[in-house]
Image (cartoon, rainbow, N blue to C red):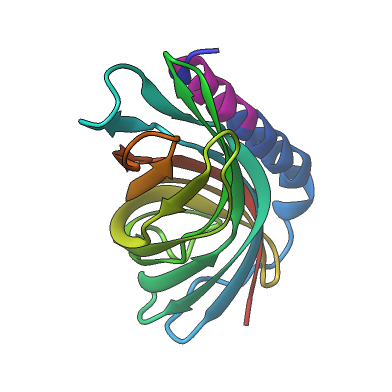
């Protein structure tokens, strides 16, 4: 399956799930009281996210081929603090595991876990309404751990900073509870050093640049 097909499938799953949750709750929510977004609020969300890398690699040590990184689907927790009714800081915490391959020639490079804590500054539109979309931008620091080298003798990934953009919406259900749909674009880069049995280790510059699609629920204090 090509990346574009994976991306469209992931987007469709998130959109359908989000729409179904909103539709199922609309009838009860129309008459229920809800808490508007306000300065000083602390928001905790739990999401299910799909992480879809948009990898691109370059190296002068391997004549042909490219790196391929698979998708992962995991739970995620995020925390937001509202500086004003419309402006909030959000910190996300999740860890994912990805299988890594080199294609043409085909080499199994094992797997690696990623921990990319991401802090974004958001602007929330229509903070006093049930449906409140938002946009955001920020920074992340990606840590790679639990590397499995596969067919390579050894493999190492360099940690590093990146940046992020996001868009999403909250839909108030009742009281402090809300539904959430969120899409992020992370820009992640790592230098990979793999011992493939040659005279010297191969060094590869890899841009992961994943899309992160999320659906979940939130509670505001």
Residue 89, given in percent of the width and then of the height, sits at 39, 73
* Residue 74 to residue 70: above or below: below
Which quadrant of the rendered structure holds the C terminus? Answer: bottom right
Q: Is residue 31 left or right of residue 108?
A: right
Residue 98 visible = yes
Q: Is residue 151 magenta?
A: no
* Residue 173 to residue 103: above or below: below
Seen from the viewer's position, the closer of residues 43 and 163 is: 163
Residue 187 visible = no
Q: On the image, which quarter does residue 197 sit in?
A: top left
Image point (57%, 74%), residue name:
43
Which quadrant of the rendered structure holds the N terminus? Answer: top right
Q: On the image, which quarter does residue 31 sit in?
A: bottom right
Seen from the viewer's position, the closer of residues 77 and 147 is: 147
Residue 56, given in percent of the width and then of the height, sits at 32, 30
Stretch of the chain drawn in magenta: 4-13
Residue 127, given in percent of the width and then of the height, sits at 43, 65
* Residue 25 to residue 67: above or below: below
Seen from the viewer's position, the closer of residues 159 and 13 is: 159
Q: Is residue 196 left or right of residue 50?
A: left
Q: Is residue 10 left or right of residue 165?
A: right
Image point (39%, 75%), residue name:
85
Seen from the viewer's position, the closer of residues 29 and 66 is: 66
Residue 106, given in percent of the width and then of the height, sits at 50, 18
The secondary structure making up most of the magenta span is helix
């Amino acid at each position: 399956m090509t990346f574009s097909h994976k991306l469209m499938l992931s987007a469709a799953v998130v959109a359908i799930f989000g729409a179904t949750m909103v539709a199922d709750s609309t009838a009860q929510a129309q008459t229920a009281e809800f808490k508007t977004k306000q300065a000083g609020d602390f928001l905790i969300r739990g999401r299910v996210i799909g992480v879809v890398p948009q990898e691109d690699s370059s190296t002068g040590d391997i004549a042909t081929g490219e790196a391929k990184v698979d998708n992962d689907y995991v739970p995620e927790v995020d925390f937001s603090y509202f500086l004003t009714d419309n402006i909030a800081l959000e910190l996300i915490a999740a860890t994912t595991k990805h299988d890594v391959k080199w294609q043409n020639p085909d080499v199994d490079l094992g797997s690696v876990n990623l921990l990319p804590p991401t802090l974004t500054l958001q602007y929330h539109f229509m903070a006093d309404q049930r449906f409140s979309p938002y946009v955001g931008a920020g920074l992340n620091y990606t840590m790679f751990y639990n590397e499995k080298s596969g067919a390579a003798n050894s493999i190492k990934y360099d940690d590093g900073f990146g940046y992020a953009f996001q868009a999403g919406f909250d839909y108030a259900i009742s009281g402090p509870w809300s539904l959430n749909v969120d899409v992020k674009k992370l820009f992640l880069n790592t230098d990979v050093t793999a011992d493939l049995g040659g005279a010297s280790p191969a060094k590869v510059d890899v841009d992961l640049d994943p899309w992160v699609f999320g659906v979940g629920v939130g509670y505001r204090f």
